[in-house]
Amino acid sequence: MAFTATLMSWGLIDFGRSFGPHREEARKAVRWATDYLMKATAKRNTVYVQVGDAFRDHACWERPEDMDTPRTVYKVDPSHPGSDVAAETAAALAAGSIVFRDADPAYSKRLLDRAVAVFEFADKYRGPYSSSLHAAVCPCYCDYSGYQDELLWGAAWLHKATRRREYREYIKRNEVVLGASDAINEFGWDNKHAGINVLISKEVLMGKDEYFQSFRVNADNFMCTLLPGISNHPQIQYSPGGLLFKVGSSNMQHVTQLSFLLLAYSNYLSHAGGRVSCGSSSASPVQLRRVAKRQVDYILGDNPLRMSYMVGYGARFPRRIHHRASSLPSVAAHPARIGCKAGAAYYTSPAPNPNLLVGAVVGGPTDDSDAFPDARAVFQQSEPTTYINAPLMGLLAYFSAHPNPAESGGD
């Protein structure tokens, strides 16, 4: 959730003008998340990070109104550190403070003050939340990449939000120790490495800080791994229909998150008159934008199946998404309670979901076949997530305002 909030905010920060009349709606969506994160961090040196038992919840297929599984609350604190989740929460609050800096200065200050305190806690009491809360958060929400990347990510957002020298020095001092150049082609809720390098590179490209030149080199190397015809990176491939895919489940998270970084970096390069250096070749900002736009177009239906992977958009879209409230009848249609196991009949039904979760983007094709079964049980492909949608918000805003990738524009 914190990563979702950070990425929504980043989209608004970089492409705010492109949102046009939807800018205020987007801010409201960010505020919904930051309000919750403020409540979850109200107690000093404590972050409440999870409500509910993942095993019990996953064992039931029932509507939110009928839920009767335990609402156990889990927290990280000095005795049970969680630098990863705490630093990401600090990043979300810091990014949110930038979003509201002009629209609501008082709220912005509260977010930033809290971000500073939460990051201090994350850095002082180091450790992964997967160790402190292993039984509760693993295997569903384990942090497999460690907490080091989140500390750099949190510091990068605090530097952007505060312009304080202490965060600049923290980033440079910890660049090697916290592995800024590790796994540079990864970016998502668990692994922030590529995002760190792109975010910090803006300082270099805008001529503000040569101090961070190594992050620019890392960002260039990352971009090169994504470009068809240039990349020979074994972890990133393209399907015959043009979809970027990485081995694993919920592939659209990689598509939207990596496409967002391509777009953000292309705009930084455009403003600086720069290019991406890829060994003996190079790539222009326009090339980066074209790759990002191709991915967005694929999601919206320009693919071999002519399937939009956004529910409710286009003539053909997923009808059997892996989502309880979407697949079970509404309380209005079925007032009687549907118990934990009674929902199984709806889960296994071949019928389309009765309630459209409009706007949700599902995991989509997971290999090089461009295939999609539209089956509720295949959660790897049919489950929507907030962290798939979050970076797509900025992408859609940008390309709606700049349909031609040869144009450049950003805030």
Image (cartoon, rainbow, N blue to C red):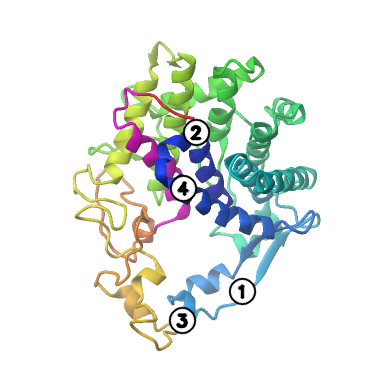
Label 2 residue SS: helix
Amino acid beneath label 3: Cys
Residue designated by label 3 = 340
Residue, disc 1:
71
**In the rendered image, which residue does mark 4 sit on?**
390
Q: Considering only order in the chain, which callout, 1 or 3, is on the residue closer to the N terminus?
A: 1
Q: What is the C-alpha distance between the residues marked 4 and 1? A: 26 Å
Position of residue 206 relative to residue 242, above or below, is above
- Magenta segment, which residues? 384-407
Frontmost of labels 2 and 4 is 2
Between the residue at mark 2 and the residue at mark 1, the CA separation in whole angstroms equals 37 Å
**Is disc 3 surrounded by few (<14), some (14 to 19) or many (20+) residues within 10 Å?**
some
Dot 1 amino acid type = Arg
Q: Nearer the viewer, mark 2 or mark 1?
A: 2
Instruction: Find out whether the residues at labels 2 and 3 contact each other: C-beta distance under 8 Å.
Output: no
Image coordinates for residue 313, horizontal then vertical, percent: 27, 53
Q: Position of residue 237 (x, y in %)?
A: 34, 35
